[in-house]
Image: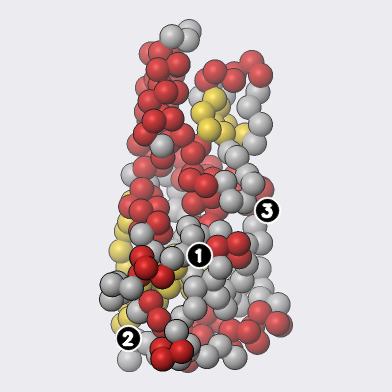
């Protein structure tokens, strides 16, 4: 019988887990389908401290599934050598859109989307306003020590620097420490995983027929052939 539990993971730790290969998405999951409005709304929710929904995962081994290629999932590049010694992987079965959006905007821009935050007008933008350019931070700078320090240094010499420095440090804290809820399902076989996957995707943007069939026809990879 399946077991499940919920854990909270800070956004910075979640990013690290994705980069270390501890969180992957199987290749029967759909590719990235979100639009720019959905990405922006996700970041607005985090800024306001609102929940962004539970990420559903299945706990398993690296060879339980074939990982989605990075051009499909927009997760960090998956390298087998990173996972060979890992006995437990969290396979994402619902929430891959949110994780891909977060990782791309905050780390590698694989989606070709750069998001900014205007510290003066307190809003997220895809293109900084010219009048507030020096007080608008690129969101990926929050997760780069070097870039964040450089932004703070430049901000220090601007007008109203004290208030803006307080605001940017608050923004940094909100995102690095934001708690993401993850439900972990353990002790399930591959057929149960597919059943959970299809049930979860009955709501929201429905899976296409070919996506459902792809999931239902998924076969566990043969360990001896890898």
Q: Residue at x 53, y 33 (%)?
A: 138
Q: Quadrant for the C terminus, please.
A: bottom left
Q: In which quarter of the image is residue 6?
A: bottom left
Q: Which of 3 and 26 is in front in this view?
A: 26
Q: Is residue 27 visible?
A: yes
Local secondary structure at mark 1: loop
- Residue 118: image quadrant is top right
Which numbered disc flags the more N-terminal residue, 3 or 1?
Answer: 3
Of residues 17 and 9, the one nearer the viewer is: 17
Q: Which residue is drawn at 63% across and 44% down?
A: 113
Instruction: List x then y, in percent, for residue 166.
Output: 37, 22
Whole-number angstrom distance, CA of label 2 to CA of label 3:
35 Å
Residue visible at 60% across and 40% down? Answer: 114
* Residue positioned 66% across, 62% down in the render: 33
What is the x, y in percent for residue 150? 42, 23
Spatial distance from mark 3 to mark 1, Cα to Cα?
15 Å
CB atoms at circles 2 and 1 under 8 Å apart?
no
- In the displayed structure image, the side of residue 11 where residue 48 appears, left or right: right
Residue pointed to by mark 2: 187
Residue 170, placed above or below residue 92: above
Of helix, strand and loop, which one carries label 3?
loop
* Structural crowding at the residue carrying mark 3, measured as other residues with C-alpha within 10 Å and reported as few (<14), some (14–19) or many (≥20): few
Q: Is 205 located above or below residue 132 in the figure? A: below
Decide which of tag 2 and tag 1 comes sooner along the chain: 1
Q: Name the residue under label 3.
A: 35
Residue named by callout 1: 95
Q: How crowded is mark 2: few (under 14 residues within 10 Å), some or many (20 or more)?
A: few
| Image coordinates for residue 131, horizontal then vertical, percent | 64, 15
């Amino acid at each position: 019988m399946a077991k499940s539990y919920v854990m909270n993971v800070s956004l910075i730790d979640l990013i690290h887990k994705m980069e270390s290969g501890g969180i992957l998405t199987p290749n029967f999951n759909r590719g990235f389908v979100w639009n720019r409005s959905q990405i922006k709304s996700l970041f607005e929710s985090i800024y306001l401290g609102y929940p962004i929904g539970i990420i559903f995962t299945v706990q398993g081994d690296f060879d339980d599934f074939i990982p989605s290629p990075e051009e499909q999932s927009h997760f960090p590049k998956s390298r087998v050598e990173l996972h060979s010694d890992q006995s437990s992987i969290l396979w994402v079965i619902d929430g891959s859109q949110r994780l891909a959006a977060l990782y791309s905007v905050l780390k590698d821009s694989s989606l070709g989307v750069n998001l900014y935050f205007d510290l003066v007008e307190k809003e997220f933008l895809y293109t900084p306003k010219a009048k507030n350019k020096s007080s608008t931070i690129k969101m990926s700078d929050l997760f780069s020590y070097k870039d964040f320090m450089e932004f703070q240094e430049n901000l220090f010499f601007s007008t109203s620097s004290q208030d803006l420095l307080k605001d940017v440090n608050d923004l940094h804290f909100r995102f690095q420490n934001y708690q993401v809820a993850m439900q972990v399902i353990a002790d399930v076989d591959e057929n149960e995983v597919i059943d959970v996957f299809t049930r979860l995707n009955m709501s929201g943007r429905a899976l296409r027929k070919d996506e459902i069939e792809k999931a239902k026809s998924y076969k566990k990879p043969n360990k001896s052939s890898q």
